[in-house]
Image (cartoon, rainbow, N blue to C red):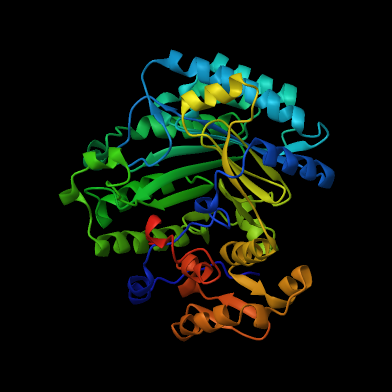
Amino acid sequence: MMDQSIKFDVNLINRYDKAGPRYTSYPTALELHEGFGDREYREHIAKSNAAGGPLSLYFHIPFCDTVCFYCACNKIVTKNRKHAEPYLANLCKEIAMQGDLFDSSRVVNQLHWGGGTPTFLSYEQMKTLMEVTREHFHLRDDDKGEYSIEVDPRETNDQTMKHLRELGFNRVSLGLQDFDPAVQKAVNRLQSEERTFSVLAAARAEGFRSTNIDLIYGLPLQTVDTFAVTLDKILAVSPDRFSIFNYAHMPARFKTQRQINDADMPTPNVKLAILQMVGQRLTEAGYVYIGMDHFAKPDDELAVAQREGHLYRNFQGYSTHSDCDLVGLGITSIGRVGEAYIQNVKELEEYDQLISQGKLPVFKGVELDGDDKLRSAVITQLICHFDLSFAAIEKQFGICFSDYFAKELEALAPMQTDGLLVLSKEGISVLPAGRLLIRNICMVYDKYLAQKQQQFSKVI
């Protein structure tokens, strides 16, 4: 059985804690360019249809009722629910346009609504959106797909969860971040334990197969003790998964973060201590480290997929659906279809203009070349499984690994000396001390990184 443990080494983390990508794709989204548009996307859809296979759909719902000061997502903050109506009308038109381009026999095995706050929408709006999707894409009706939604417990109740289940959702992720009142006030997200746990209980009562809780460490006024209190309260209700993200404080880049008092930010040492506590508490509670910021119960599909060697990573994070082409819908959404990444436009006005002209709202994209696909396979294998077989890569791509990646293997040698990994003639095995630093290991294989590194957050 695969060893899914982690080892926390403060000295190693301090030495390796530098900026780097999260590798939800390779090449990263920074390599997408405006020379890729509607025509190129249509060409890749045609190639994708020829290859066949199931689909994954991602819908971006950008609206939020209030602004959380830490947030770096693409969002529109408004209390007027009518502001969503023209956007949803355009989104339904895009669904029709894209659905007509994909082979109707291709089953949608994975579907995700993200944001923003998808539960900003009324039940009727959500119902219409799902009905239009079902009209133009081949959605499953046997509940065997992975249909997930991000919810804000502050805008969700028992009836909401009932409606979502009726619409076909079977997985839910609850945004929380921290229960501490001082932290909540500092980031403008006031959220009660009672409401949060009520939504979780409702999800279970309605038969949602998987429940996830989102937390963030490194927020203003957080300490090891206060975050431990939050964590213990959540462990008591035993969600299936945890997503525990490192807060990247970049106020120069994200305007809303400027409302956070810099003096309230925890020191790097405090952040590390919180991370160490989190790893210890969760592993003691029986959760396994999937990678990056994710922990799951041993019988969760992600943990099983990791042990069985078919875990995957895409723009939504870790996934069990590596066989799906990912179709992005709505502003800012990113997809992967065939051998290309595609991103939609970011502004509502431009989105409206393109949709009204009957054009796909593509902003930019990139077609992967042979080297991209090779490096993507290496990075995906490492970040998902902490292990890489040279023979498997050589067979798939027709290369000699030690020749093709001679410089990279040389660059990994100090990491072996530091106890992050083991290099052998057969491959790479990431050790427990290297798993928290997996992004550093993957960065060795990123040929685009040098000129772009300043645009990423730190790995820890």
Residue depicted at x 72% and y 24%: 134
Q: Nearer the viewer, residue 161 or 77?
A: 77
Q: In the rendered image of this protein, does residue 416 appear above or below residue 294?
A: below
Q: Nearer the viewer, residue 151 or 345?
A: 345
For residue 316, side relative to residue 417 (left or right): right
For residue 349, side relative to residue 425 (left or right): left
Q: Is residue 139 visible?
A: no
Q: Which percent across, then down, holds residue 16? A: 38, 72
Q: Residue furthest left?
A: 263
Residue depicted at x 26% and y 62%: 268
Q: Quadrant of residue 113?
A: top right
Q: Is residue 6 visible?
A: yes
Residue depicted at x 74% and y 41%: 43
Q: Residue furthest front?
A: 35
Q: Which percent across, then down, holds residue 285? A: 46, 57
Check the picture and name the quadrant holding the C terminus: bottom left
